[in-house]
Image: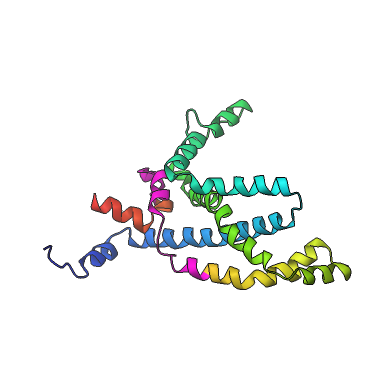
Amino acid sequence: FSPFVGLKNFEYFFKSSWAWTVTRNTLVINILFLIVGTVCSVVLAIVLNEVKAKKFLKVSQSMMLFPYFISWVIVGVFVYNIFNYETGILNSVLTFFGAEKVNMYDASKAGIWPWIICLFNSWKWCGYNSVIYIAAITGVDAEIHEAASIDGANIFERIRYITIPCILPTIITMLLLQVGRILRGDFEMFYQIVGNNGQLFNKTDVIDTYVFRSLL
C-alpha cells in the first residue's frame, strides 16, 4: 500500500508561488461562467418560448443542442484555427482589411482569454441548460399571460413581470448547484483551449491544470 501523505499535497499547493494566482483564476472564471451562462440560457429559453413558428422552433432547438455533443478537443481546434497568428481566421480578416496581425497567444493579450474561454463555454452549454428553463417557462400558467395581454401588457412587460418572476426559483436553484462547483475547473476545456502556453497561465491557469502540470 502507498503511505498515507495526510495534508502534504495541500501544504505543497499553498506554499507554491502559484497558489493565489490559480485560485483567483478559478474563482473569477467560474463566476464569469455563472453570470454569462445563466443570462444566455435564460434569454435563449425566453426567445424560443415566444417563437410561434413550429418548423423554425424544431430546427433551432436541434441546432442549439448540437454544441453540447462536440468534444472539447474539436472546440480547441476551432479556437486555434480562429486565433492562430499565421493562418487564423481573425488575422486573415484583419490583413484583408489592411490592419496588422494580432498575436492572441502573447502574454500581453492574456487578459482577454478568460472572456474567450467564457464565450466558448457558454456556446457549448447554453443550449443544453436552456432546456431546463424552457421546461420551467412551459409550466407557467398560460391564463396569467392571457390576462396580462387583455390588460394591455406587451411582450416585454409579460416577460419582465410574469415569465422571469415565475422561473426565478429555477434560476436560483441552478445557480446554487453551480456555485458548489466554483472551485472546480473543467480540465479538458482549459487544457484543450489554452494548452501548455505559459504566456497565458497568469490569467487562464486554474487549480485543475496546475495540479496536472505539477504531477507531470
Find out whether residue 190 is within the magenta segment.
Answer: yes
Q: Is residue 191 visible?
A: yes
Name the image quarter holding the N terminus: bottom left
How far across and how far down the image is residue 101, in percent?
53, 31
| 44 in relation to 167, above or below | above
Does residue 28 appear to the left or right of 147 in the view shown?
left
Q: How many marks?
A: 0
Q: Residue at x 30, y 59 (%)?
A: 17
Q: Is residue 105 visible?
A: no
Residue in the foreground of this view, choosing between 165 and 134:
134
How far across and how far down the image is residue 138, in percent?
68, 64
For residue 100, which quarter of the picture?
Answer: top right
How far across and how far down the image is residue 18, in percent?
33, 58
Q: Residue at x 58, y 53 (%)?
A: 127
For residue 170, which quarter of the picture?
Answer: bottom right
Residue in the foreground of this view, choosing between 78 and 149:
149
Does residue 33 appear to the left or right of 8 in the view shown?
right
Q: Residue at x 24, y 63 (%)?
A: 12
What residue range appears in magenta?
176-201
| 197 in relation to 40, above or below | above
Find out whether residue 54 is within the magenta segment.
Answer: no
How far across and how far down the image is residue 42, in percent?
63, 60
| 130 in relation to 179, above or below | above
Q: Residue at x 52, y 58 (%)?
A: 33
